[in-house]
Image (cartoon, rainbow, N blue to C red):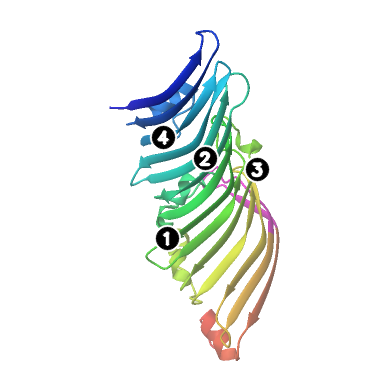
Amino acid sequence: GSEVLLSGGVKGTTEDFQYDLLLEANYTKIEEFTKGFQLGNVLQGSLNITGQLKGDTRGFLISEAQVLLDNMPEYGIEAAGKLNYPFSGENQLSLHAAGELASLGYLLNWFEMDMSEFGRAQGSATISGSLENPAIEDFRLRTENSNGLTVSITGALESMSDATTDTQRHNEVRFDIQAPQLAALQRWTGPLPVEIGPWQVSGRLLGNRQTMSIDNLIFQNGNRGSTALRIEGAIGEVSGMASKGNSTISNVALHASLYAPNTANIADLLSITL
């Protein structure tokens, strides 16, 4: 079962007191911890917390905290930092976390698509805000699947709270995706008419589940001296991501360039005869 151990000193009266304690807490289910703060059941798994607990009748501070959340194989997270919790006013959370996720979808849940095929994700993040409304100021994640498709993303998520509506969220995610073959995308695109070899695409996503935009978009393939395609530009609006099959793309501004040593290389790329 769960247990909480406190050791240290308490002084004062029943109406006005201070304490300085060493905290060691083990919860078999994280819900046993979060229910004391009236939080939702966003996370699952067992929770271990150690740290220095100082407080009085006005609130408490957990400093030098070490936190371990274990919900493997779905996710496992280790974090270090502090929590300032006044009984009147908003609490403040400051943590640096690292861990592993079974899918990017746990963090990028504003995309209505299956991300499990990208593979497991490893990464780190800086978490601020409050327990009720946490924000991720900076995160870095990387995945690689059996087809050689690698995804690296960095960015910030303004609010992770279920109470925050999609239109209130202003997320920013930079991405870099590459693979040895275009066929690595067939899980999402279906069979493709051409194969262009190694490729890479990068850019920045801004917005939320309802509406987002993409800028600094660069797609390129090929090696020096071989046939190379490069596309760069921006997509002004991608809307309706929350409705499967009903997404719309508008305000597209792309520039494409193609280099080839000779016309035969272009014919091979397009599977035509010149």
- The label shown at residue 238 is none
Q: Secondary structure at mark 2?
A: strand
Q: Of label 1 and label 4, which has the lower sequence position?
A: 4
Whole-angstrom CA distance, mark 1 to mark 4, is 40 Å
Q: Which residue is mark 1?
A: 187
Instruction: Indicate left or right for 72 with 229 as reference.
Output: left
Q: Which mark is residue 81?
A: 2
Distance, label 3 to label 4, CA atoms, is 31 Å
| Residue 4 is a magenta residue | no
- Percent across and percent down for residue 139 are 55, 50
Q: Which residue is mark 4?
A: 49
Tag 2 near tag 3, CB within 8 Å: no
Q: Earlier in the sequence, mark 2 or mark 3?
A: 2
Which residue is under mark 3? 170
Q: Secondary structure at mark 4?
A: strand
Q: What residue is at 67 percent from the left and 77 percent from the top? A: 257
